[in-house]
Image: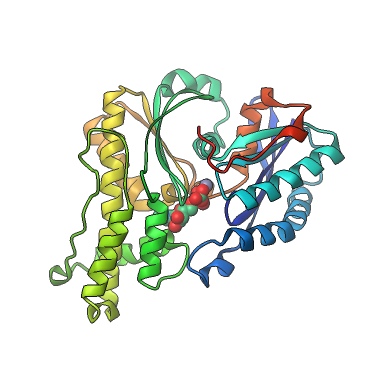
Amino acid sequence: MIIIGIDTSCDDTCIAVLEARNKKIKILSNIISSQTNLHTKYGGVYPFLAKREHQKNLPIVLKKALKKAKNPKIDLIGITVGPGLEPCLWTGVNFAKDLSDTLVKPLIPVNHIEAHILANFVGKSQISNLKSQIFPAVCLVVSGGHTQLILMRGIGKYKLIGETRDDAAGECLDKVARILGLGYPGGPVIAALAAMKLKVKNEKLKINLPRPMMYTKDYDFSFSGLKTAVLYKVQSEKRKIKSEKYIQEMCREVQQAVIDVLIHKTLRAAKDYKVKSIILGGGVAANDELRKQLQERIKKEIPNTKYLIPDTKYCTDNAVMIAITALFNKKKATKNWKKIRVDANLKI
Ligand code: KG4
Ligand code: ZN
């Protein structure tokens, strides 16, 4: 079976082609047309600008993805219907509907959050054999749009147990990068600068930021206060902001504050729900320090718990994760695809 995945939920136009045969999944192509340069200018994503780019890019990206996959016969089309930016989602959905119509093949609506979780199963051939070892699991999905803790009892069986009450973790990093004049997206550049600082410790420059909601009894998060704390510090220390070392130290501390809260709440959820595994997903899951520190803490505190992280290239938005989610949901294939609608606030 050949599956096409399409994602236009934010600022990347993504199309991938997968082949599923004898329970083995092969990636035939994975094309991402990034609008980063366009949005760097503004320090964030403007939905209507992003929508226009998707409209322009979709036919080109499809052609590339099909060519790279050697133009196979398509059986199934997976399309992200939410959550995401509404105008961008509609552009992708309308494009996918046309494609479904032209190829006379079923369309599967995909939840972007579920896709970030299932990105963990790309490249794992015998998922059915793994099920008894993995579930129940606690999933931490951290991206530019979301920060959620989800209890997963199997594929398709999710319960949201906590989420951010304001900004997402990635959004916080993006906003801090804007405050520091580092461009967009903020996560990768903050990670790179933080890694430099880790090598050159300078006690005089030490910055302490809050760890919002770290010890509250729920599984919720809040990151907007962290960004405001950075803003106040920077405003009160105008002179030092010019120093490269000050920026590196700020990046290290803000990244560590985010990581501390994410790890603390994830481990508590894992212990409370006595899960067999912890699953990470979303753009911020590409962060090396988060990946490493979470692994160390699991090893120390709950060593019998499995730890699943996607390959870094499947953490940030991509359509391989959309195609694999469509495959897992192929029973949702509907002849009524014309009725598929987007939901910008779609829940898992
Ligand atoms: O999943 P994603 O590509 O898009 C959404 O669904 O939101 O996530 C993008 C987010 C951005 O906020 C970006 O700054 C962050 O992921 N990000 C990172 C890293 N790479 C991307 N954050 C921290 N460290 C990284 N290496
Ligand atoms: Zn995403």
Q: How is the image coloured?
A: rainbow
Left/right of residue 222 with respect to residue 203 in the rendered view: right
Residue at image location 74% in from the left, 26% down from the top: 334
Quarter occupied by residue 235? bottom left
- Image: 330 above or below 43: above
At which x and y percent is residue 59? Answer: 77, 55
Q: Quick one: quadrant of the N terminus?
A: top right
Marker count (numbered): 0
Quarter occupied by residue 319 = top right
Q: Which is more toward the observer, 51 or 275?
A: 51
Q: Quadrant of residue 71?
A: top right
Q: Is residue 285 above or below residue 3?
A: below
Residue 336 at least partly seen: yes
Residue 272, image x and y in percent? Answer: 27, 25
> Residue at 34% of width from left, 48% of height from top?
290
Side (left or right) of 67 relative to 309 = right
Residue 25 appears in the figure: no
The residue located at (29%, 69%) in the rendering is 248
- Report x, y in % for residue 229: 25, 61
For this orientation, the residue located farthest to the left is 204
Q: Nearer the viewer, residue 250 or 45?
A: 45
Query: For the point 66% across and 57% down, which residue is it?
Result: 51
321 in relation to 283, above or below: above
